[in-house]
Amino acid sequence: MQLLSHIPAFLKNKFVLTLIGFAVWMLFIDRNDLLTQISRTKKLSELEKSSRYYTDQNREAAAELKRRETDPTAYERLAREKFFMKKSNEDLFLFKE
């Protein structure tokens, strides 16, 4: 009985003990504990960022495709810029940045 006399009265209440036990269970022991939720939120944020990046890349590719369909010189520009092709009477100079 000497040991129980040092414990504050509100900690002897069965409802407070149940609430504390439930909080400890939900924060640290449960399958969906606090650390798991934080890591899942971080992963979701990374995935949303990746999704935005690929959506932007998709839009750019669609715009380039539309440009190629409407502009007859688009293929020539693509060949010159991306693949460094040239006409037979031209000289090609490449500069490193």
Image (spheres, helix red, strand yellow):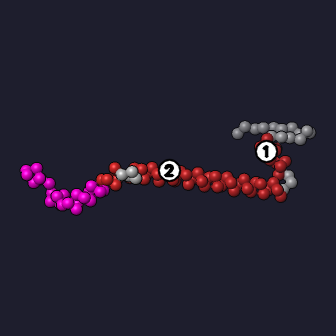
Q: Residue at x 71, y 54 (%)?
A: 60
For label 2, the residue is: 43
The image quarter in which residue 5 lies: bottom left
Which corner quadrant holds the C terminus? top right
Q: Which residue is mark 1?
A: 81
Q: Report the amino acid beneath label 1.
A: Glu
Q: Is residue 91 left or right of residue 62?
A: right
Place of residue 23 in the rendered image (x, y in percent of width and height, measured from the top left): 30, 56
Task: Classify residue 53 as left or right of residue 2.
Answer: right
Q: Determine contact: label 1, label 2, CB under 8 Å.
A: no
Say what amino acid the circle numbered 2 marks: Lys
Residue at image point 86% right, 41% down: 86
Number of other residues with Cα within 10 Å of mark 2, as a class: few under 14, some 14 to 19, many 20 or more: few
Going by the image, does 91 lie left or right of 16?
A: right
Q: Position of residue 75 (x, y in %)?
A: 83, 49
- In the image, is residue 8 part of the stretch drawn in magenta? yes
At x 79%, y 41%, the residue is 83
Nearer to us in this view, 83 or 55: 55
Question: Which residue appears at 69% of the width and 56% of the height?
Answer: 59
**Span shown in magenta:** 1-23
Seen from the viewer's position, the closer of residues 89 and 38 is 38
Query: Element at badge 2?
Result: helix
- Helix, strand or loop at label 1? It is helix
The answer to whether residue 1 is left or right of residue 62 is: left
The part of the image, by quadrant, that contains residue 79 is top right
- Residue 23 is tagged as none
- In primary-sequence order, the first of circles 1 and 2 is 2
Please say if 89 is above or below 49.
above
Badge 1 crowding class, 10 Å Cα cut-off, few under 14, some 14 to 19, many 20 or more, is: few
